[in-house]
Image: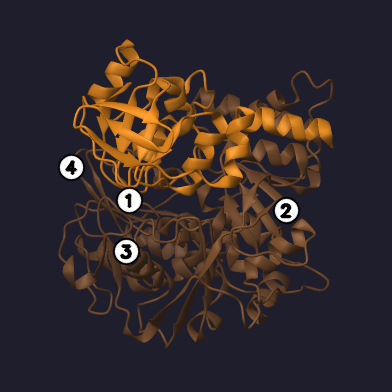
Amino acid sequence: MAQVVLKLGKDISTDDIYPGRFMATVLPTETPQFCFNDRAEFNARLKAGSIPPGSVVVADENFGCGSSREQAASAMKGHELVVVARSIARIFLQNAINVGTRLVLCPAIEAAEGDELELAAGEVRNQTTGKAFPTVALPPARQAIIDAGGLIPYTRKKLMEA
Amino acid sequence: MGMTVVEKILARAAGLRSVKAGDIVEPKVDLAMSHENTALVINQFNEIFQGTGREARPWDPSRLAIIFDHRVPAEGPKTATNQKLIREWVAAQGVKKFHDIRGDRGGICHQILPQYGYVRPGAVVVGADSHTCSHGALGAFAFGVGATELASVWALGVALNIEVPATIKVVVDGEFQKHVGPKDLILNLIGKLSAQGANFRVLEFHGKAIRKMSTSGRLTICNMSVEAGATCGIVPGDEETVRFLKEEAGVRGRIECVLPDDDAVYEKVVKIDASRLEPQVACPHMVDNVKAIGKVAGRAIQQVVIGSCTNGRLDDLATAARIMKGKKVAEGTRMLVFPASTRIFAEAMDAGYIQTLMKAGAVVMNSGCGPCLGIHQGALGDGETALATTNRNFKGRMGNPKSEVFLCSPAVAAASALTGVITDPRKGGK
C-alpha cells in the first residue's frame, strides 16, 4: 500500500519538478533537496523526511514535459517517490527508467491526496475509493533497462559483451 | 512498404534494410552533444566503467560536441567549477568540437552545431538537451536525452533500445503574410496538436512554405517540435540545406539528402495554409495555450526578450531592428536581446542591428541560454509579465514562479517592446 502524497494536473513540466535555477546542482546525491522546490509545503515535507519512501505522486496527462534535465528524475528517485500518471512525456519517462525512478502508466487513474493505492500487476487499486484502474505496459524498448536495474548497469553489461 | 525520413535514417544507422514504426533498433550515433550538464554526463560515464577494469574513454572523441551555453560566463562558483572540470576532461579526452566561453566561436549549442557544419542530412544526433530536435532542420534525426543516456552513448557509440517513432506528416502550403513566419507556424501547430499530441512521434515537414523557408526558419520550427512532445521535427534535406551547409557552415564535399519514400506510412497528415496564419501568442503557463494575437493584444508587459536557440538568429535580429529603427522601447518595459551565437552577434553588429536595438533602449547580452530558462540573468519580479521569442512559458520558467511568460515571434516582440503592451506588428505601435 502506498499513499498519494501529491495530486497534480496535466502538463507538469520538469521546471515544476526541478526548477531551472537549481540546474548547476547535478549529482543525484544533491538534487533531492530541490524536488518540487516551488511547491514549498511539499518540498518542506520531503526535506523533513515526513514522506515515506514508496509514496505516490499522481498526475494527469503529459507528466514531465519540457526540459531533458535528469535532475527531475533523480530528485524524485532520491525520495523514492513513485509516479502514477495518465501519460508521461518521452524524455522524462526515459530518464526515470534510466535512473530507476518508479513509474506506472495508468490512463484513467482517479485518486486524491491521502488515498491509499495498491500498485498491483496490471492495475492500480484505489483502496480508499474501492475503484481499480488498468495500467499499460511501459514501452518494450525500456523494459529491458528496468529489468537490468537502470541504464548504467545495462550499458556496463553491453560494454563487457562488446 | 515505404519508409519515412526517420525510418530510413534509423535503418541505415542500425545496419538494417528497412525498419518501421515500433521496431526496436540500436542506431550508430554520428554526434553526441552536451552543454554544462556534461558535468553529470562525465559522472554517469565514469560510473558505467566502474569495476570493469577498463579505462573510461568515449568511443570516438571526434563525435562528441560540448558547448558551454547555459550559464556563460559562470554566474557562481558551482557552475565555474563544473565548467573547469569539463574543460579538463575535454583536454584529457581530446574532444575538438568544444566551444568554451569565447567571443569568437561561442554560442548556444543548437546554433553552434549547424553553424559549424557538425550536423549533416541523414545523421543520428543525440543531445543531452530537449531542444536537440532542432537539428532535424538539416534533415538529421536528432533527439534529446538525459545525461545518463548520453553517457551510455559515449560508452558504446550507439543509442540503446530506440523504438522507431511513428511519424506525423505536416504539410504547409501557401505564403506567409507580412510579419507572420515560422514561429507563428510552429506555435499554431503546437496549439492544434497539444503539448502531448506528438509524444513519441516525429513531425516531418513538407509543403511549399517549408521549401521556401530558410534554414533559420526551419531551425525554429524543428526546435519547438518538442513542445508538442515530438521526439524530433525534421525537414527532409533539399537545395536550401545544401546551400546552408556549403555557404554558411563551410562544409565541403558531397552532401547527400535523405528523402521519404512516396509510399511512406504516416500516422496522420496535418495540413496548414500559411497564408491564413495570423501572428500567434502562447499564453501562460503552457506552450499549447496558443491564441491569435487579437485575443491578447493590449496586455501589459514589463520585459521583452528576443533571443535563444529558437529565435536569436540574424534574420530574427534584422526583423526586430527593422521594426524598432529610430523608435524607443516603451517606458516601464525593458528589452533584452541575446543573439544565438557570437558569430551572429558580430554579423548583427556589422549590419547595424545591434546599434539600432541599443539606441532603441534594448540591453544586448552575450550569447547563451540564461534568460530563457531563468538560470542566468533576466529573471522576472513577482507579478511581472514577459513576452519572449523563446520556447517555453511553464510556470517559473523565467526564474520566478510568481511571474508569467507569453511566447511570440521576433516581429511581435519588437512591436510590443515599443508600446509596452502585446501588439500586432501588422498594425504597428504608436
Q: Nearer the viewer, residue B387 or B169?
A: B169
Give whichever of discs 2 and 1 has the lower sequence position: 2
Image quadrant where residue B30 sits: bottom right
Residue B280's spot in the image, x, y percent? 30, 69
Q: What residue is shown with label 3?
A: B413
Element class at badge 3? helix
Q: Is residue A135 left or right of residue B132?
A: left
Q: Amino acid at mark 1?
A: Asn
Query: Mark 2 and mark 4, same subunit?
Result: yes
- Colour chosen for chain A: orange
Task: Say which residue label 2 marks.
Answer: B27
| Type of amino acid at the residue the image marks with label 2 | Pro
Q: Position of residue A10 (x, y in %)?
A: 29, 46
Eye-nearest disc, 3 or 1: 1
Residue B423, position as x, y percentages in the image? 22, 69
Compared to residue B272, the image places residue B283 above or below, namely: above
CA–CA distance in space, label 4 to label 1? 15 Å
Residue under pointer 1: B393
Circle 4 residue: B383
Sooner in the amino-acid sequence: mark 2 or mark 4: 2
Between B81 and B325, the one nearer to me in the picture? B81
Apparent side of residue A153 relative to residue A118 in the rendered image (left or right): right
Amino acid type, callout 3: Ala
Marked residue chain, label 1: B
Looking at numbered disc 4 in the image, what kind of residue is underneath it?
A: Gly
How far is the residue under mark 2 from the one under mark 1? Answer: 33 Å
User: How many numbered badges does the structure rendering display?
Assistant: 4
| Quadrant assignment, res B252 | bottom right
